[in-house]
Structures are given as C-alpha cells and as structure tokens.
C-alpha cells in the first residue's frame, strides 16, 4: 500500500483514539452516586492569585462510597478550596472542619440517574461524531489522490480499512456507554 495512504489511515486512527480518551475523561466526571475523586480534577482554586487545579494544592481521596476528603497541603487553603468547590456548580456541598474539607455525595434519585444516563449518551454521541469526522478527513484526500493517479482499487481497499477501524472505535464507545449506564443505574 502507498505510504501516503497508510499515513492517512494512521492519522484517522490517532484522531479516533483521541475521541475515546476524551470520552473516558468526560465519563469519569459524570457522578454515578459513588464518591469519585476525579469529579474534582477540573476545579480551579485561587492559589495566591493564580487559578490552580485542585489536585495540585491538596490530596483528594474517596474515604468510602459516599465521602470525598480534600486535605490541603497548607491550612490557609481550606477556605479557598471550599469556595472553589461551591463555585464549580457540581451540586456538592463541602464541609470544612478546620483540618480538611469533607464532601458527602448524596444518594441519586431515579430521575437524576436517568438524566445522567442521557448526559453520558450525549457525550458518547459527540465522540461518535468525532470518529466519523476523522473517517471523513481520511477518505476525502484519498478520493483526491485517485484523480492524481492512485489506483481505484487501492483507494477502495483503504476506504474499507478505515471503515473497519471506524466500526471498531464506535463499538468501543458503545461498550463504554453500556458500562457507564450500568454503573449509574446500579443502586
């Protein structure tokens, strides 16, 4: 197979892999009713005037399935951490006891669980769109290469390979969504 054709296939595969990594990251932030320290990864704390991600100023741990603790490395950071968690609109209510910030994760209602499943599926659909865009971005230059002298059978074989890769990545997205839905709906 032509080197340029292989390059387009590899590029598409790489873009599709980025879509999967993005989905994994976003699904880890969707609360499933259990304490998951990752939901605080994007919280920015005012650390002496500069916005800093929470995990860089404190230790974030899940003590049990209902409690997350945030142990700041400096006691002066307790109030800014509590304020940052409140301002992040995560639906969490942090409790500052003078030593650490404790966050109790409320039990999810059936309605809220269904909303989270819908949210997860929306994230999955966005990833599938990204995967389809990667497929399109790989196939379009191949069609142009046919006009420049690439044999049509080579182009059709490459297109079939790209479709197989696309199907595999879409299947992975479906598996990830099914696992997350099961996780969310499990009480």
Image (tube, rainbow, N blue to C red):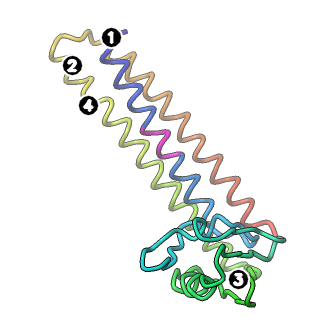
Q: Indicate the secondary structure of the residue bearing disc 1.
A: loop
Q: Is 100 on the left-hand or right-hand side of 124?
A: right
For this rendering, which residue is in front, 77 or 147? Answer: 77
Asked which secondary structure carries label 2, the reply is: helix
58 lies above or below 120:
below
Query: In screen coordinates, is 138 left or right of 179?
Result: left
Whether residues under marks 1 and 2 lie with C-beta atoms below 8 angstroms apart, the answer is: yes
Instruction: Report the residue marked by disc 4.
Output: 140
Q: Which mark is residue 101?
A: 3
Q: CA distance from mark 2 to mark 3?
A: 59 Å
Any magenta on residue 21? no
Label 3 close to label 1 by CB (< 8 Å): no
- Circle 2 or circle 3, nearest the eye: 3
Q: Is residue 136 visible?
A: yes
The quarter of the rendered structure image containing the N terminus is top left
Q: Which residue is mark 2?
A: 145
**Pointer 1: what residue?**
2
Q: Residue 105 location in percent, x, y?
A: 74, 79
The residue drawn where x is 74% and y is 73% is 33
Q: Earlier in the sequence, mark 1 or mark 2?
A: 1
Nearest the viewer among 140 and 2 is 2
Q: Position of residue 40 (x, y in %)?
A: 61, 70
Quadrant of image for the C terminus: bottom right
Q: Write down the region rendered in magenta.
A: 15-20
């Amino acid at each position: 197979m032509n080197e340029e054709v292989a390059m387009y296939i590899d590029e598409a595969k790489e873009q599709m892999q980025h879509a999967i990594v993005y989905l994994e990251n976003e699904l880890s932030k969707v609360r499933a009713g259990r304490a998951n320290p990752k939901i605080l990864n994007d919280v920015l704390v005012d650390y002496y005037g500069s916005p800093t991600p929470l995990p860089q100023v404190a230790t974030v741990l899940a003590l049990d399935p209902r409690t997350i603790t945030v142990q700041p490395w400096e006691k002066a950071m307790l109030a800014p951490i509590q304020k940052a968690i409140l301002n992040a609109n995560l639906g969490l209510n942090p409790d500052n006891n003078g030593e650490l910030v404790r966050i109790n994760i409320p039990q999810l209602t059936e309605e809220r669980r269904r909303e989270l499943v819908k949210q997860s599926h929306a994230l999955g659909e966005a990833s599938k769109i990204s995967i389809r865009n990667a497929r399109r971005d790989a196939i379009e230059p191949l069609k142009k290469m046919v006009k420049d002298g690439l044999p049509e059978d080579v182009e059709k074989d490459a297109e079939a390979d790209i479709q197989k890769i696309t199907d595999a990545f879409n299947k992975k997205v479906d598996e990830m969504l099914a696992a997350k839905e099961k996780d969310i709906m499990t009480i």
